[in-house]
Amino acid sequence: MRPRKPWHPAALLGPSLLLLAVFVVFPVALAALASLYSWDLLTPPEFVGLANYRALAEGGELLGVALRTLGFSVLVVTGAMTLGLAIALLVHRPGRLFALVRGAVFSAYVVSWVAVALLWMGLLDPDAGLVAAVLRALGLGRVGFLGDPDTVLATLAAVTVWKVTGYAMILFLAGLEAIPPVLHEAASLDGAGHWNRFRHVTWPTLGPTTAFVATTSLILSFQAFDVVRIMTQGGPARASTLFVYAIYEQVFLNLSVGKASALTVVFFTLLLALATLQLRAWRARGMS
Amino acid sequence: MKRALQWTAILLALGIATLWLAPYAWMLATSLKSLKEIAAHPTSFVPREPTLRAYAEVFAAIPVARELLITVVMASLIALLQIALALPAGYALAKLHFVGKRTAFVLVLACLLVPSQVTFVPVFLLFAKTGAVNTMVALVTPFAVSALGTFLVRQALMSVPDELIEAARMDGASEVTVVYRILGPLLRPTLVSLFLVSFVFHYNDYFWPLVMTTDESVRTLPLGIALLREQGTGVRWHIVMAGNVLLSAPVLVLFALVQRQLVRAVAGK
Amino acid sequence: MNPSSQKTPLGRRSFLHLAAAAASSAAGVSAAGAVGAACRPPLPREAGRTVATLWFSYGGKNREVLLDLVSRFNASQARVAIRATFQGDYFEALAKLRTALAANVAPTFSHVVGEVIPYLARAQVLEPLDSYERCDEFIPQLGQKGAFRDGHTHPTVAIPFNRSTPIMYANANLLDTLPSTWDELRDTARRLTRPSVGDPRWGFEVPISWWFWVAMLGQAGGTLIDTDGTPSLGADAGERALRFWQTLVHTDRSMRPPAGRDYNAWQVTNQDFLAGRAAVIWTSTAFLRYLEDTASFPVIAAPLPKDLRASVPTGGTFFVILRSAPPEEKEAAWTFLRWMCQPEQTISWATRTGYLPVTQAAVAQLRDSGYYDAHPNDRVAYEQLSAVEPWPWVPNLFRIQRDIVEPRLEDAVHRNLDAHAVMNSARAAARRPV
């Protein structure tokens, strides 16, 4: 349609584009610029070229943070997807109990990260916690969980899985709804058992959903912050310092705007790479 | 065989329900215990001497009502602004022909890829310079436009026939009327989804209020509750869990009321 | 002229202006910010009183005691009101303070750890206090003049408040003579360790933290930063301190490196001690009252053991007034600080928490009243002040602590890395210009 007045599109789009420019485009540019300076917010900034990047790369910090974050994401994505799919298959049937399970699992996704993180800190507390007591009752002794650099990342991933499995489940349920019952009936008539029906009917039709859930949760878990900030502050021994927490730490705890910006630039580049994957998955789901 | 399978499904379902519901039950139980009882019986789900003292302590330590109000106002403002701005923008992108339309659309899509975790450092500097740190402005304006919301509104408007808009124009409706009075109600389900997802997300948000505030003037409830976990002399879990109950109860009530819509919104249906 | 600004093609002003220009020309955010600021609750006057804002960072009991003192002060006179805001633990609160300074929304006064004071003083954000009316005389090691090497050569910007030193606590049910040297500590720890899956006990526990490492570095005869400003990090002594921890953790398996970052680890140490899972711990004198009151066993305190000599750093925080505050608020804050330094308040704070009394008058009053005879642990804490090693006045000190040493210590102890290599890399990083 033709706009009634030539300036109408500008007026309609203007506010949105302006705000996006101020709060998205401009910050990305400013981060790139600030990454070339050494600045503590209180004393004058100083141009240092690529020294921030070099310092981060030399100490192995950058690679460490990137690998750790990726490892965390992979744990979360595989965990949440497997559980989400399994639960979706289980509760994709009528009955109050199954409706209750759907609601219960999804509720964790709706509740605040602050509440979930504090709740699990309590549950995992070596003295006052439920989990520790259960382990003691089973004669398993004390497990480090949040306190041991070897287990902390897996523990945070597990808590995240608990929180986000509901999201994967909901999307898989939507995918299951979309499978025409005729397909299953036809397969049954051909004598296919449960497993074969899953393999040859359910799984292939869920393909686009799976790709969508995988990429979306990959990107979301890549941005994890709250869980780290509240449960571990990146420790012990930096074993749970994920990307966004590292940026936060640099700018707010160390007041090193330059290093934080350099980390931001790298983080953004990695996100863009992941997002290309995501866009492909979105298109696939849109078509199905 | 079939029966056995049915029973397995029921048992599994019960197990999963426990895995997700027991933590809430423990949270509630712990919030009703005294510190002594937590030390003696950390795992019991039924407090022997239930007391509301922990809740009283939460109310004494942080201004719960004020922080809740700030949080709700903030989340509502964001959700409403997103809708108010997404409608005209989505309309222009879906229905109008003009030079630069493709560029504008690509720009909106590109912004989908930039989360607030990337922009917070420069945006903080900007607000610091303009004196907006610790104000509602710093909490709301960066989210007033939702790239995702604009995109979804545009998609939904694509399926609205042009004739409808033309007819409205013939009747003398201004563009403002077309956008808010005619297309708005038509997109009700999409807009309700948008509102719910956005409201819940920002009600729960910890990250942005944390980095954009330094004092109590616009401290939101998640920040206040997170501060209850004081360190050094032992966490007082009953107080933390009482705070947790206060923080999650509103969202869980909302969830119970609009579960169907919320699920649909998240599933993107 | 500041040499750094000559090298800078883009000074601080233009850097910030870039942000401001983009913001105001694009969206009128400045105006919106001003409107938002106007909506904030009014601060300056409250029923004719000058209101000074205080950001504080104590948890639990300490918070209750401080708030009690604040409300007593507010009730004691009608001219000044103190509004106290809780900001999380020291490091969280300090982060908020520094960002607030950058954003021009700082409070009237706050309290900060000693290590950051030289940096804040150089950034010129602290109010010089020499022209204000005098407080009571401080204990030398706890005030700015004695807590820092050459502290008297700098204008006074910090007033001691909750000051502490590291100290050793033991579960008196498990041992009655406390180790007085590193070797004795090692033996004691080994003897008291009980390996067990279900109910283990460690002989010794201490947070793997900068503060205790500095103490050990001093005990091993080293100096953190040489008098000429070289960050030697104690040279061999710094490595020896780290190696001692590694020996206890990995060779003897008699020490548990407590889990968690910053104060999480301190809390774990306290919890393990109280639950009988650690026989001897090092932590702050600040926990004296809490541990005595909470433990189900008698708690005995002792000075940290010697290696070559006795040495402890001071810790806790100093009050600072921010230069950016309006003069009448600064005066109001000062009125409160002077009140806090009176013996009655100093004693109330110290005896209810375990922090050290900071004025001569307060100590004299405690001694005369027989307090130290009734509380031998408090006496140990006070007497250990003779072993205090002052901090160097180096603006870089806080960065060396947070950015360079602290992360390396945790990593080195957990993964048993070569102490020499770790400290070499720390020294190299500390020498690198900011």
Image (cartoon, rainbow, N blue to C red):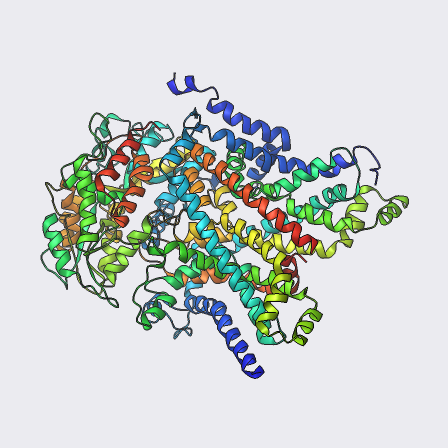
Looking at the rendered structure, the number of numbered marks drawn on it comes to 0
Q: Tell me the quadrant of the picture where the N terminus of chain C can be found.
A: top left
| Residue B85: quadrant of the picture | top right
Looking at the image, residue A39 lies above or below residue C275: above
Residue for point 58% across, 64% down: B253
x and y, in percent, of residue C207 in the image = 26, 50
Residue B47 x, y percent position in the rendering: 40, 73
Q: Is residue A83 visible?
A: yes
Displayed quadrant of residue C384: top left
| Front-lying residue, C303 or A235 | A235
- In the image shown, does C233 or C270 lie closer to the viewer? C233
Residue C53 visible to an observer of this rendering: no
In front here: C208 or B219?
A: C208
**Location of residue C111 by image quarter:** top left
Would residue C16 appear left or right of B238 to someone viewing this image? right
Q: Single out the residue that lies furthest toward the right.
A: B170
Q: Is residue A250 left or right of residue C170?
A: right
Give coordinates of residue B239: x percent, y percent: 41, 61
Residue A83: where, in percent of width, then height?
A: 51, 64
Residue C394 in the image: above or below residue C168:
above
Q: Residue at x 52, y 56 (%)?
A: B65
Q: Quadrant of the C terminus of chain C?
A: top left
